[in-house]
Image (tube, grey):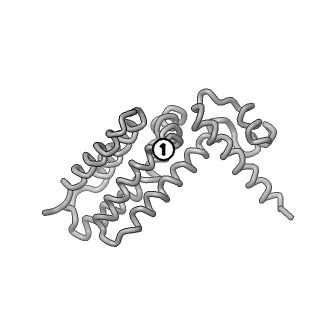
Amino acid sequence: MTSRAEQREQTRRILVAAGRRLFATKGYGAVGLSEIVRAAEVTKGALYHHFDSKADLFRAVLQEVQDEVGRKVAAAADAHDDPWTRFTAGCRCFLSASTHPDVQRIMLIDGPAVLGWNEWRAMDEAASARHLTEALTSLMDEGVIARRPVRPLTHLLSGAMNEAALFLAGSSDPQDLPDTMAALTQILESLRTT
């Protein structure tokens, strides 16, 4: 027998999944609440029980996408023992994951537009900048890269990778991904101590 709490959580998951499918395929602006509840096979009341608005549902979808990308990046990094390889594998994985159409639409295109730059940036920092800061600090502690202020470096690298992901989102040239990976590798290599 399913408890009421489990039913509520299941309804929430169904709403997030339906919202994600629709936001990814149509974009936030083209999706109405009626369409979301129809796709989720729930009532508007059920939607409003879990989310204050369409933007609130989108925030939950964005969080889910960011968490998934974060898990992929962590798995790619954790597959390596060498700290430098772990770091660069994570950065490359972020760019690769960002080429998926769902991720592009939800995380990179609609995310800043729907939530506003400040909220989107705060979510991005909570999702990935913390891990990037930890990785850079660890590399500095191990002498792999020169010691320097971590916060500005984190923002520079995060901004460069987000911008590269946005560039790839708008590209139709299959050569752009390997070219972008090569450019990222050059940037990252420039940080290493000799």
Give me the residue at 68% from left, 29% from top.
32
Q: Residue furthest top?
A: 30
Residue 166 x, y percent position in the rendering: 40, 37
Q: Is residue 11 left or right of residue 84?
A: right
The residue tagged with tag 1: helix, strand or loop? loop
Residue 194 x, y percent position in the rendering: 13, 63
Residue 122 x, y percent position in the rendering: 46, 46
Q: Residue furthest front?
A: 174
Give me the residue at 22% from left, 50% from top.
186
Q: Nearer the viewer, residue 92 or 46?
A: 92
Give me the residue at 59% from left, 43% from top.
59
> Quadrant location of residue 35?
top right
Q: Is residue 22 above or below residue 188?
A: above
Residue 86 x, y percent position in the rendering: 34, 64
Q: Nearer the viewer, residue 133 or 24?
A: 24
Name the quarter where the N terminus is drawn.
bottom right
Give me the residue at 36% from left, 39% from top.
174
Q: Which residue is mark 1?
A: 100
Number of numbered discs visible in the structure rendering: 1
At label 1, the amino acid type is: His
